[in-house]
């Protein structure tokens, strides 16, 4: 399997898993569970499951200063952007509208990369990003116009979510721990997230809340399994894709949210869903297309041949 095919498969798998996780999380939030409780159980359960699997294989996260710094920064961005702010917004606006904002992360990722590198992304990456955005906007923009005033405030605040997701994409791509397997990185990052959320969870919840959480253990268990699979898949994708290619999962997340919403909640997709799907998939293919190295100049080639002949 070539690298482009591998990246496309991982992009689709990661996006579908994260999108499914949003739907399960939304189910818990509408039942009255707090974003802090849902977030803590999600990352703590995923950490326990993943660490147990790694321990059985004799693996554990490294503890050198550079790797610990990576875990801390990546976890902080994830906790603020996705776990806390994302769940807070998700509790106040429809899941489909929330995914509209997630799809802005590829554009913010391209802009952040351009700012850091002081250069524009490749033409294929830029075209693929815009195609994906167009595909999702085709379905979601009409839905975004239906929110009320209170939801509009939450929607405005939620713009920070794709910005933080983009920052996380860029940071992980540039500072990935050398030689550390993807599942180990996932376990370390999730573990730090759980430690960050533990004081908040302990301060805001009591024994009665734990009993209530126990009553929805099937949903919690499903969310934990999805979180483990999504994080491991994302970690593998991060190893083979740059930050712009990685960010394309945002488009898959959006369409997954819409598809599951139609399947589980009877929401109508509309006839625009199919062309949107085509645009998103085309965008992913473009972004993951291998970049060919420029052919050497003919004059340079002839010069090298003359040098080689002289050496002989």
Image: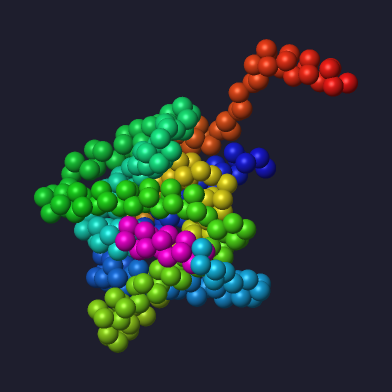
Query: Can residue 53 be seen by looking at this rendering?
Result: no
Which residue sits furthest right? Answer: 312
Query: Can residue 121 be seen by looking at this rendering?
Result: yes
Give the number of callouts. 0
Q: Magenta region: which residues?
A: 67-81
Instruction: Name the side, left or right, on which 180 lies relative to 199.
Output: right
| Residue found at x 84% / y 17% | 309
Residue 155 coordinates in the image, percent (x, y): 21, 50
Which residue sits furthest front? Answer: 310
Residue 92 coordinates in the image, percent (x, y): 21, 58
Depth check, front residue: 197 or 233: 197
Residue 2 coordinates in the image, percent (x, y): 66, 40
Residue 89 coordinates in the image, percent (x, y): 24, 57
Q: Main secondary structure of the magenta part?
A: helix
Instruction: Name the side, left or right, on which 243 lies relative to 209.
Output: right
Residue 110 lies, with reference to residue 147, above or below; the image says above
Residue 47 lies, with reference to residue 158, above or below; the image says below
| Residue found at x 27% / y 51% | 160
| Residue found at x 60% / y 44% | 6
Residue 225 lies, with reference to residue 280, above or below; the image says below
Coloration of the structure image: rainbow
Depth check, front residue: 169 or 82: 169
Residue 286 part of the magenta segment: no
Residue 80 part of the magenta segment: yes
Quadrant hosting residue 1: top right
């Amino acid at each position: 399997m070539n690298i482009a095919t591998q990246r496309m498969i991982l992009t689709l798998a990661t996006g579908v898993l994260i999108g499914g996780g949003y739907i399960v999380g939304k189910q818990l939030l509408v039942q009255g569970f707090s974003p802090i409780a849902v977030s803590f159980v999600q990352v703590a359960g995923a950490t326990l499951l993943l660490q147990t699997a790694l321990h059985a294989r004799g693996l554990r996260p490294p503890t050198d200063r550079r790797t610990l710094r990576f875990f801390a920064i990546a976890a902080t961005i994830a906790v603020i952007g996705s776990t806390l702010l994302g769940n807070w917004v998700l509790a106040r606006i429809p899941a489909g509208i929330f995914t509209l904002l997630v799809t802005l992360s590829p554009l913010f990722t391209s802009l952040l990369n351009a700012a850091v590198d002081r250069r524009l992304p490749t033409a294929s990456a830029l075209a693929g990003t815009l195609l994906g955005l167009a595909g999702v906007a085709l379905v979601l923009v009409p839905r975004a116009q239906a929110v009320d005033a209170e939801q509009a405030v939450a929607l405005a605040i939620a713009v920070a979510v794709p910005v933080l997701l983009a920052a996380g994409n860029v940071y992980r791509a540039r500072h990935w721990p050398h030689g550390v397997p993807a599942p180990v990185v996932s376990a370390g990052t999730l573990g730090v997230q759980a430690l960050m959320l533990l004081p908040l969870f302990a301060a805001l919840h009591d024994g009665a809340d734990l009993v209530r959480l126990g009553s929805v253990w099937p949903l919690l268990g499903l969310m934990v399994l999805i979180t483990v699979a999504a994080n491991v898949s994302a970690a593998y994708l991060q190893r083979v894709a740059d930050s712009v290619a990685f960010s394309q999962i945002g488009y898959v997340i959006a369409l997954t949210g819409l598809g599951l919403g139609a399947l589980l909640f009877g929401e109508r997709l509309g006839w625009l869903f199919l062309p949107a799907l085509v645009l998103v998939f085309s965008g992913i293919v473009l972004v993951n297309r291998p970049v060919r190295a420029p052919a050497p100049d003919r004059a340079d080639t002839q010069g090298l041949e003359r040098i080689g002949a002289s050496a002989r």
